[in-house]
Image (tube, rainbow, N blue to C red):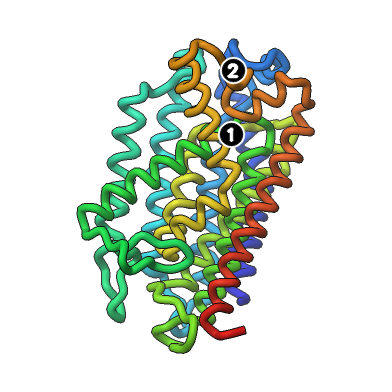
Amino acid sequence: MKSVLIAAGFGLIISIFMTPVAIRAFSRHGLGQEIRDDGPETHLAKQGTPTMGGTVIIGSTVAGYLLAHLFALGERGFGVTASGLLVLGLMVGLGTVGFLDDFLKIRRRRSLGLNKTAKLVGQLVAGVAFAILAINFPKGGLTPASTAVSFVRDITPLALGSAGFVILAYLFIAGFSNAVNLTDGLDGLAAGCSAMVFGAYTIMSFWMFTHDCVNKPGAGCYMVRDPFDVTLVAAAAMGACLGFLWWNTSPARIFMGDTGSLGLGGLMSGLAIVTRTELLLVVLGGLFVAVTLSVIILVAFFRATRRRVFRMAPLHHHFELAGWAENTVIVRFWLVTGMAVAFGLGLFYADWLSFVGL
């Protein structure tokens, strides 16, 4: 438990103290956000706010994880694992794609960076590499990921085989990285919601560690390769998001950019895959799913009828144009995420109770 607190604490401390350093550095080099001219007019005042703050979130997450291991050096069974390195690698890989997108936006002085094809290729490389590696590195008969579709644990009849798993994993990773990217449109919205989801994964993966089938077999135990190491990653990410939120909350002094949103979405999907909770992430990250669906529904409905079902997509902009103040949208969306996370944790715990007969 001490290592978990160290990971979260260092993730928070590094993020909260390094973000103002990044703000000054990015401002000095003119690395400011380009704002869409077709969005809410109130957002035009944010033009030039430093962006690419996701570099701090990713760096703080990795540092928090490594420092937790450094402080636990010599403790039996708490070394760096394939699962931890893979999910961090996925975060860094997708964060790199986002960094290139942010850099091109700044260089070209417009709100469009990488084209859709280049971004999808980047997500394809990162997602497929993660998926292939995740079904290797067996330990105790377990690999970091399994080829079965999972909810709270693997749904054994829905085993996909290696090829099917790689395809599904890529779609899942690309879907959630883009979902967080779409949600990152208001000050502190994506960072606050992400912190709650990572908090849920900290709780769930630690519970898996204390009910691990390899070391503590029994009713309701979990077949997860490295639950404690995954806990450290989730805790470090939670701390990093909260530290960044200190400076990113309205009025934001820095934005995470695609660097942060793609990286955070990748980490969420990676955590879901290695903990065998893929479909549960749809519940925990229900707000991200709703925001993505709002874009799909708006585009499909407009193409079919030439009419708009929403004033604007993503969903948070619809409510802004409906007259909600930005802070009202943010806080209410945080509340929705909190309820989704609570419901998801309830489903997780109810599943365990069903095995132990309580």
Q: Residues within 10 Å of mark 1 (few under 14, many from 20)?
A: many
* 296 to the left or right of 82: right
In percent of width and height, residue 83 lies at 38, 65
Front-most of 260 and 80? Answer: 260
* Residue at x 71% of width, y 23% of height: 320
Q: Amino acid at mark 2?
A: Ile
Looking at this view, name the residue that lies furthest to the front. Answer: 305
**Helix, strand or loop status at disc 2:** loop
Against 315, residue 167 (above or below) is: below
From the viewer's perspective, is the residue at label 2 or at label 1 nearer? 1
The answer to whether any part of residue 71 appears in the image is: no
- Residue at the disc numbered 1: 184
Which circle's residue, 2 or 1, is located before the other in the chain? 2
In percent of width and height, residue 29 lies at 56, 23
* Residue at x 65% of width, y 24% of height: 317
- Residue at the disc numbered 2: 35
**Helix, strand or loop status at disc 1:** loop
- Gap between marks 2 and 1, in whole Å? 13 Å
Q: Amino acid at mark 1?
A: Asp
Is there a contact, CB below 8 Å, between mark 2 and mark 1? no
Front-most of 230 and 346? Answer: 346
